[in-house]
Image (cartoon, rainbow, N blue to C red):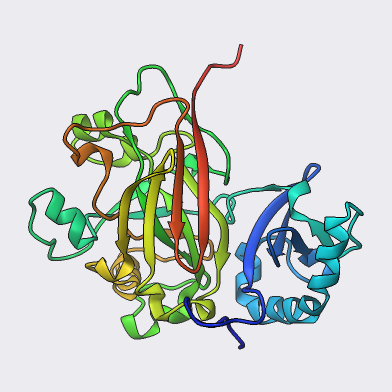
């Protein structure tokens, strides 16, 4: 299957970026062909399933639709620039709302202290095995959607993370077969209520706040990136200021080991998200500590994938 040149190498065609979007009330799977042009997969091929959970097993067919239409990209961008509507199966990405690429995963598995520089900033030894915890799927937030903070949450932190999305089910997956189960990679922001995390002495409540799992803006397939997404620069910016800056080469446990370790106890299903851990530089371990506040904007940027941006605002109960 043809793929993108690795980051830093020349490339003459766009990467295949998997998106989920709404146009009107319909939730649809598609591809982002450029900054402006999207491809409606169901309009392109009505025989395809209507969500990524079911599309992952037939990604070769998705690639065929991608290859079939990329030759028209320059023409479609010209139409966009003059403000004319695009003909199906294309659409203007600026006229739709991007959702989290995966809607309602069966589980979100996160990994604690999985970067060497994050362990160093806590003066802790490297863990002997992956430390897994769960985030409630209801925490997911769309690209550009607000991170909403109730008034009593005043110790909320952001964590830039590389997330791997499972494309094929499996139990007790070996490291050697882990690649067969990867649908792709995306950006993830592990928003954390530190007060709840430390009070509970476990992670679930503090890591599962509503809107506390921004994800996206798309999934990039493995063939577009280095093997196991190794060696990618990753950073987190608050209001344009770099808070975290590292590289996935700092991961203590690589993606294949995380898949092996997690699947030893549970079946991984298509659409499951494994968020692989965060680098050093988080607000809670700075001196003085820094926490998110309404009016902030948080960006997670990963080389070869893209940028996930979310504003922070005060949550107000609906009346």
2 lies above or below 78: below
Q: Position of residue 97 (x, y in %)?
A: 70, 46
Q: Quadrant of the N terminus?
A: bottom right
220 lies above or below 60: above
Res. 47 in view: no
> Outermost residue toward the top?
319
The mark tally for this picture is: 0
Q: Position of residue 8 (x, y in %)?
A: 47, 77
- In screen coordinates, is 11 left or right of 278? right
Q: Residue at x 60, y 71 (%)?
A: 56
Q: Residue at x 19, y 33 (%)?
A: 198
Q: Residue at x 89, y 63 (%)?
A: 88
296 lies above or below 189: above
Q: Position of residue 243 (x, y in %)?
A: 32, 46
Q: 201 or 106, which is in the foreground?
A: 201
Q: 34 or 197, which is in the foreground?
A: 34
Asked where in the image residue 235 lies, by quadrant, the reply is: bottom left
- In screen coordinates, is 162 left or right of 19? left
Res. 181 in view: yes
Q: 278 or 311, which is in the foreground?
A: 311
Q: Residue at x 19, y 41 (%)?
A: 285
255 lies above or below 198: below
Q: Position of residue 207 (x, y in %)?
A: 35, 40
């Amino acid at each position: 299957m043809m793929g993108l040149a690795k980051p830093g190498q020349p490339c003459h065609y766009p990467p295949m970026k998997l998106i989920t979007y709404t146009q009107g009330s319909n939730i649809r799977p598609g591809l982002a062909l450029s900054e402006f042009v999207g491809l409606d997969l169901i309009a392109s091929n009505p025989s395809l399933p209507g969500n990524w959970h079911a599309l992952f097993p037939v990604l070769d067919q998705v690639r065929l639709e991608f290859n079939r239409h990329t030759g028209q990209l320059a023409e479609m961008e010209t139409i966009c620039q003059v403000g004319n509507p695009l003909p199906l199966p294309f659409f203007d990405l600026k006229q739709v709302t991007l959702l989290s690429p995966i809607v309602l995963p069966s589980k979100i598995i996160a990994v604690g202290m999985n970067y060497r520089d994050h362990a160093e900033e806590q003066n802790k030894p490297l863990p002997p095995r992956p430390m897994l915890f769960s985030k409630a799927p209801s925490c997911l937030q769309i690209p550009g959607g607000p991170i909403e903070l109730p008034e009593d949450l005043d110790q909320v932190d952001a964590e830039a993370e590389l997330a791997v999305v499972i494309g094929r089910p499996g139990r007790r997956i070996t490291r050697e077969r882990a690649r067969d189960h990867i649908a792709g990679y995306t950006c993830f922001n592990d928003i954390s209520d530190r007060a709840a995390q430390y009070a509970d002495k476990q992670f679930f409540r503090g890591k599962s706040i509503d809107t506390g799992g921004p994800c996206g803006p798309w999934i990039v397939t493995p063939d577009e990136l280095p093997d196991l997404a190794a060696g990618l620069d990753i950073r987190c910016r608050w209001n344009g200021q770099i808070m975290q800056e590292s590289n996935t080469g700092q991961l203590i446990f690589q993606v294949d080991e995380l898949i092996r370790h997690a699947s030893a106890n549970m079946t991984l299903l298509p659409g499951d998200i494994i968020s692989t851990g965060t680098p050093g530089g988080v607000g809670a371990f700075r001196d003085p500590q820094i926490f998110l506040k309404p009016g902030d904007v948080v960006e997670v940027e990963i080389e070869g994938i893209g940028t996930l941006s979310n504003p922070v605002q005060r949550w107000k109960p609906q009346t």
